Image (spheres, rainbow, N blue to C red):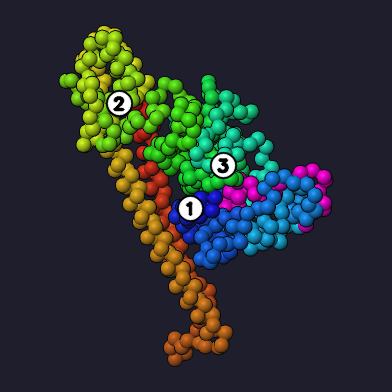
Amino acid sequence: MRRFLKAVSNELNQVGGQLQQQAGGGFGNYGPPQPPPPGSGFGGFGFPQPAAAPASAVPCPRKQPQIGFTDWIGLPDPRFGAFNVCPSCYNSVIRPTPYANAFVTKAAPPNVPIRCDMSRYWVKMAGLVLMTMNQDGRYDISLLARVAGVNGGECPNAQLTSEMQPLAVVAQPPWGWYTIIGNPIPGWTVCASCVWHIQTCLPAIANGFAPVQLPGQASCALVPSDHYDDARTAEMLRYVATCAVASAQLGRVEMSQLVSWLRQNPPRQRGGAVGHPSSSSMGGYQQQQQPQSNGLCPRNHPSTTLRCHTMQGLFDFTVCEQCYADVIRPDTDQGVALARQFEPNPAAIPSGFTCQLYSDRMRRVWREATSTGDVQYLRQKVSERRAKERELQMKTTQLQQQAAQLRQQAEVQQHLAANAMRVSANAASTNSMLAGVGVIHQVDAFHYTVPNGVPDFSQTTQLNNQATMLKVQAAQAECQIAMAEEEWKRYWE
C-alpha cells in the first residue's frame, strides 16, 4: 500500500505542480497537490520520508471487528458517531497531521464488534486527498468518516490476499457494474462499491463512470485489498487521481489519461487454474467472442516476438496463431478454399505484425468472403483496415511524443518556479531581519527605504501558470489519442 501511495503523491505533484491559486481561477474541488507535513501520512499516504520507517507504517491491531475496547477515538460531530479509530492508528497516522485536534475520545460503544476505520483501504485514499489535494480547504476531516460510511457493500476482490489469486467472478452484484463514460474499454468493469468510494473521494470525476448492463459474469478491475498491495490497482488509481486533478483544472470530466493507459497496458494473467474464468480476466465482463484469453493475440499492437500465418497473395492479412486456431484451421479442415491459401506454418516477422482477425467485425468479413469465395472483397477490407491502422499508429506515436515533450517542458517550468519561490522567500526573510534591527537603505541624499519583508511571488506565479498551460496542452494531445482510438474501435477495428 505504501508503494502505491507514494507513487500517487508523486504523480499528483507532477500534474498539479506548486501552482498558486489565482483570483477567478481555482481547481474545482481540489487545491494544487501539496506534500504533507514531515512525518505525516494516512496509513502510508504521503510523500516518501527520509527517515527510517515512518510511524504510519505501524500495522493496525484492530483490522478485524472486536468487542471490549473502551478507548476508541472519533469525531465530535454526532453525524459521524459510527466512525471509530483505534489509539494505535490515531498516534501513528493522525497525530502527526494538522487534523489531530479534530478528534476526541468517545464514550464506551455498545457491546458490538467494531473495526478501526483507519484500516480501511478507501479511508486511506481519503487521507491522501486531505493531505495532498486540499490546499483550498474545501474538505475537512469529516471526509474520512463520509468515505467510511459509504454504503455499497464490499468489492468482490476486497478479501484477496495475493496476486496469485484470480479476480472474483460475480454474476450480478447488488448495485451493478460501472465503466468509464463515453470511452468503454472492452471487458473493463468496476463494481459499484469502488465507484462510489472514488466519487466520494474525488467528486471532480463523479460523472466519469456510468452503469453498464452485462449479460454474463464479470469481475471488478480494482482490488482494494487490505491484505496486500495489488500493483495493477495501484497503477489504475494513480491514473484515476491524475484524471481528477485534470478534470478539476479543466472544469469538466477528463478521463483520457486513464483510458489511454488501460488500452496500452492490458492486464497480465493472474494466478489460478488454466481456463478459470477470471485467471486471465480483463477485470470485467468475460467476453466469449474475444480470442485473447491467453494473451497470445497482439491485436492491433505490433509484435516482433509472436508468430503469425500469412495468406498467399494477401500478405497484409496476418493472423496470429491463436486466431488461426480459432477461425482459419476449422475452415481449412472443412475444405474452405480461401482458408487453404494460408501458410500452415507460422513465422515471426522481424518488423512486427498485427493480427487482422481478432475482432468481431473482421471475422464477419471473413465469413462473408468465404461464403462467396470473393477474394477481392476480402482484399479491399483488409487493405482499408491496414491503411487506417497505420494511420492510427503514426498519429498516436506523434501525439504521445508531443504530450511527453509538453510534460517535460512543464516539469522544467515547475522546477524554475520552485527555485524562484525559494529565492523570493529567502530575500524576504533577509529583508525582514534587516528591518527588525533597524537597517535602512539610502536611495539618494534625501530618500531612504526600509527593507521589504514581503516575498514577491509574481515570477513564481507566472512560471506556474506556464506549466499549467503546458499540462493542459499535453492533456489535449492525450484526449486526441483517445478520440482517434475510439474512432478506430467504432469504425475500423
Identify the residue at image location x=23%, y=21%: 344
Which residue is at the far bottom? Answer: 445
Q: Position of residue 441 (x, y in %)?
A: 47, 86
Type of the residue with mark 1: Ala
Report the side of 347 relative to 421 (left or right). Answer: left
Helix, strand or loop for disc 2: helix
Against 28, residue 167 (above or below) is: above
Q: Position of residue 378 (x, y in %)?
A: 25, 17
Label 3 or label 1, whichever comes before in sequence order: 1
Dot 3 surroundings within 10 Å: few (below 14), some, or many (20 or more)? some
Q: Circle 2 sits on which residue?
A: 321
Residue 163, percent across and down? Answer: 50, 41
Could you tell me which secondary element the residue under label 3 belongs to?
Answer: loop
The residue type indicated by label 2 comes to Glu
User: Would residue 174 be seen by someone viewing this image from the given angle?
Assistant: yes
Tag 1 near tag 2, CB within 8 Å: no
**Nearer the observer, 346 or 99:** 346
Using the numbered discs, state the Cα–Cα distance from disc 3 to disc 1 in whole angstroms.
Answer: 21 Å
Say which label, 2 or 3, has the lower sequence index: 3
Point out which mark residue 244 bears.
none
| Nearest to the observer: residue 256 or residue 56 | 56
Segment colored magenta:
105-131
Q: Residue at x 69, y 57 (%)?
A: 88
Residue extending furthest toward the front: 273
